[in-house]
Image (cartoon, rainbow, N blue to C red):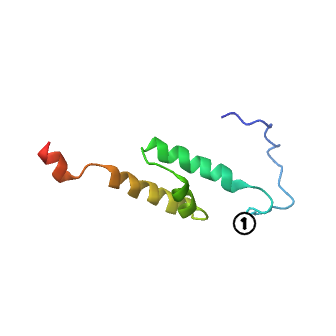
Amino acid sequence: MKPSLPAPPADWRPAAVVFDCDGVLMDTETAWAGVQDRVAADYGVDYNQAAHKQLMGLSAADVAQWITDARVRSLPSKAAKSRA
């Protein structure tokens, strides 16, 4: 994805930085949920409304672990493979 704004000059430094960790200033949760959905789909994991509620507010590392665990649970067991 190409940035829509030009880069600032190399010597530019912000006068202040605002960390909106609770979503009051910007609704970042919606965008983050979309990212989670796309990544989960890439790994064949169903990211439904229940998953969204379960993962809301968690760190990226926790979400990645949840997706990994869900993917592993969806794989056939070794016993099932040996019977095939």
Q: Is 52 on the left-hand or right-hand side of 13?
A: left
Residue 7, how many percent across, how many down?
A: 78, 40
Q: Nearer the viewer, residue 78 or 14?
A: 78
What count of labels does the image hold?
A: 1
Tell me where residue 78 appears, x and y as whole percent: 19, 52
Measuring 53% from the left and 63% from the top, which residue is drawn there?
A: 54
Amino acid at pointer 1 = Asp
Q: According to the image, label 1 marks what residue? A: 22
Near-viewer residue (65 or 37) = 37
Q: Image quarter for residue 49?
A: bottom right
Is residue 73 placed above or below 57 in the rendered structure? Answer: above
Of the 4 image quadrants, the one containing the N terminus is top right
Could you tell me residue 20's position as x and y percent?
Answer: 75, 63
Q: Residue lying furthest top in this view?
A: 2
Q: Which residue is the extreme one toward the right?
A: 15
Report the residue that reaches farthest toward the left: 83
Are there few (<14), some (14-19), or many (20+) residues within 10 Å of tag 1? few
Q: Hey, which quadrant is residue 13 in on the image?
A: bottom right
Q: Is residue 80 left or right of residue 33?
A: left
Task: Indicate left or right for 81 with 40 as reference.
Answer: left
Q: Secondary structure at mark 1?
A: loop
From the viewer's side, name the closer residue of 38 and 51: 51
* Image quarter in which the C terminus is found: top left
Name the residue rendered at 82%, 43% in the picture. 8
Left or right, residue 33 beside residue 75: right
Give the residue displayed 52% in from the left and 51% down from the top. Answer: 48
Residue at 79 percent across and 45 percent down: it is 10
**Vertical relation: 61 (above or below) 77:** below
